[in-house]
């Protein structure tokens, strides 16, 4: 059947929820990593500045890559880029503690 079903809408909302949860997990976890003396040792005075830079770089990357995502989805469909993005996000989240 062509079109969008209720299952598609629920799946899309669940995917957005998973992305938001992982995004906020990484942001909260980053605060602890930046303050931890075993990793980055950033003092509390410059912590907000560094977090702002990290968020800015993330948003700039999204703005730059967003126009190309239509071509990627048209070429590969929806499933492959979404699964690739989720796997890549999981790998990045898993390797954050080892990046320092």
Image: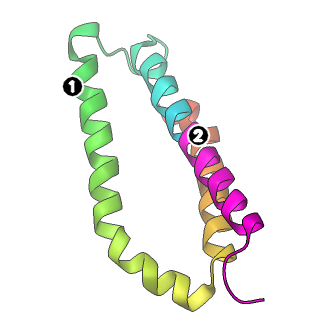
Vertical placement of residue 69 versus 61, above or below: below
Q: CA separation, marks 1 and 2?
A: 22 Å
Q: Quadrant of residue 84?
A: bottom right
Q: Position of residue 22 (x, y in %)?
A: 58, 40
Q: Position of residue 5 (x, y in %)?
A: 73, 73
Q: Is residue 8 magenta?
A: yes
Q: Nearer the viewer, residue 84 or 95?
A: 84
Q: Is residue 42 left or right of residue 11?
A: left
Vertical placement of residue 83 versus 13, above or below: below
Compare marks 1 and 2 and give the one earlier in the sequence. Answer: 2
Principal secondary structure, stretch drawn in magenta:
helix
Q: Nearer the viewer, residue 69 or 35?
A: 69
Q: Is residue 55 left or right of residue 92?
A: left
Dot 1 corresponds to which residue? Answer: 49
Magenta residues span 1-22
- Is disc 1 surrounded by few (<14), some (14 to 19) or many (20+) residues within 10 Å? few
Q: Quadrant of residue 61?
A: bottom left
Q: Is residue 30 magenta?
A: no
Vertical placement of residue 39 versus 80, above or below: above
Q: Helix, strand or loop at disc 1?
A: helix
The residue shown at (21%, 25%) is 49
Vertical placement of residue 19 versus 55, above or below: below
Q: Helix, strand or loop at disc 2?
A: helix
Tags 1 and 2 touching, CB below 8 Å:
no
Dot 2 corresponds to which residue? Answer: 22
């Amino acid at each position: 059947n062509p079109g969008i079903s209720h299952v598609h809408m629920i799946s899309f909302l669940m995917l957005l929820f998973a992305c938001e949860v992982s995004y906020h997990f990484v942001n909260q976890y980053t605060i602890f990593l930046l303050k931890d003396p075993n990793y980055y040792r950033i003092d509390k005075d410059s912590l907000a500045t560094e977090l702002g830079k990290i968020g800015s770089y993330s948003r700039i990357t999204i703005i730059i890559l967003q126009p190309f995502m239509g071509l990627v989805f048209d070429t590969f469909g929806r499933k492959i880029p979404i699964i690739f993005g989720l796997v890549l996000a999981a790998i990045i989240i898993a390797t954050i503690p080892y990046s320092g």
